[in-house]
Image: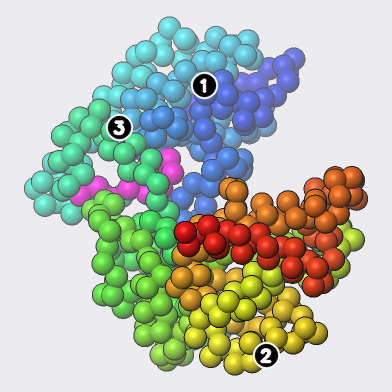
Amino acid sequence: MAVEFRIKQANDKDGLTVPQIAALENLSWGTMDRDFCLEFNKVGQITVMYSENRIGRGFELWLEKDEVVMRMPLPNTENDIRAAYSLAKKLCEYYGADSFLCDEEIVPFEHINVKIGQNIAASENAIQAMENQIKDGTQKSFILFGATNPITFGERETAEMGGTLEGFEKLMHRLQSMEVAYSNARYYQMKDGTVFGLFIVREGVMTVLPKIPVSLMGPIEQLKGYYVHLPDDNDVPYEVFRENVVPAGEYDSGHVMVCLTDRNITYLAENCTVAIDTGNSRKGVYWGRVLDNGRNHEGKIASMELAAEEYSGYNHLAVFLRWAAEKNMLSSKLTEAVPNIMEIVADGRADLRRIIANHPAFGGRLRSFHFRSDCQRFAKSFYVFGKQGYPNCVDEYAEKRLGSERYNCVEYKNEAYLFVPYDDEYYRGLSEYIEKAWKKFNR
């Protein structure tokens, strides 16, 4: 059930953009992806608007010829209902109108409170009906699409709501304001026509997953099964994943929350990974959390059309790797994967940057499991962005080496660190920062 609003745009007034419309009521906005999860701050053909301080179900808005159209789902929270009518009135006032269409009925301003009362009553009745059906066993659960993601209502949720619209509003906001990643399956078709669903889970991210995966779009023909996609392209059958991961708690009646550690992912990768096309088991590998991605730095050279040398984006990664190697802090896992790594480091003519960029053990990135545990702990505190860590030292050394005038020149476009020559002087100068931080770390 939904209520539709139509507000006529006046020809003598400039049309408002979607963000401008949202600003009239101090609303946030986004668009729903195909999994019914919100892509924040994006405007689409249909845009969802909601109150960030009281997240409910929100309402949809789009521009159609000479009208602004809104669709509000019911049941809804009282806050969202009042926000929708208030926005409709403000749009009318902007366009010089004194009424709008609501489900094809003309609603003058003086009748707005009556409509609000009707929608609140309808929502209360729907909430109570849901509760009664769950209590008497007619329905085990209901799924309602919230402003940011779907919510499953079962016995626990109905008990928390207490049969009231206020309880419904508090529940909707509590769940949707949690700092979690809500993961729905993405579906892919294989060459033989079969389809599989894939859930993406990353390390250290509290992720919401269904207890039993189902398609919100209805039954899928030739469904091969569901899998969880882990870092380093490790795919694990969904039921195997659930058997081997202890949930951090329940999100709602249909979903659990998981937060994977490096140890979790290592075990799953090495013991539970399969090739989705054949279903055969394979021994996966996981290299730990990403410390730095040289491909991101290299990407700046192309996208910003910088005249930096090839592999310059890997300069500071290579310095850290060489420093760790000379300290005998490379992990046995890395030395097994790259048996000649120490010889490469010792050879002054070898370019470590190319190894990092091209060897599958690196894939362009430095990862925590490239290093021994003591170096991992050090990197966790020192190799950090947005703080006084190693990336800041890279910039500081670049200004020291190039001089302030060149460091700030227009042609470098605030990316001067990519223009420092990669040579022994660079290694000596930059590794001094690492060594100093290492000594401080071990005091």
Horizontally, residue 232 falls left or right of residue 72, namely right
Sequence-earlier tag: 2 or 3:
3
Q: Amino acid at mark 3?
A: Glu
| Stretch in magenta | 145-154
Q: Residue at x 51, y 70 (%)?
A: 375
Tell me residue 399's x, y (percent): 80, 51
Tell me residue 126's x, y (percent): 24, 35
Q: Residue at x 25, y 29 (%)?
A: 165
- Classify mark 3: helix, strand or loop: helix
Horizontally, residue 310 falls left or right of residue 41, namely right
Q: Amino acid at mark 2?
A: Glu
Using the image as rendered, state which of residue 435 and residue 356 is in the foreground. 435
Sequence-earlier tag: 2 or 1:
1
- Classify mark 1: helix, strand or loop: loop
Q: Which residue is mark 1?
A: 25
- Classify mark 2: helix, strand or loop: helix
Q: What is the distance, in whole Å, between disc 2 and disc 1 at their CAs? A: 64 Å
Horizontally, residue 207 falls left or right of residue 372, namely left
Q: Which mark is residue 169?
A: 3
Circles 2 and 1: CB distance less than 8 Å?
Answer: no
Nearer to us: label 2 or label 1:
2
Q: Relative to residue 52, is residue 417 depicted above or below? A: below
Circles 2 and 3: CB distance less than 8 Å?
Answer: no
Q: Is residue 40 magenta?
A: no
Q: Amino acid at mark 1?
A: Glu
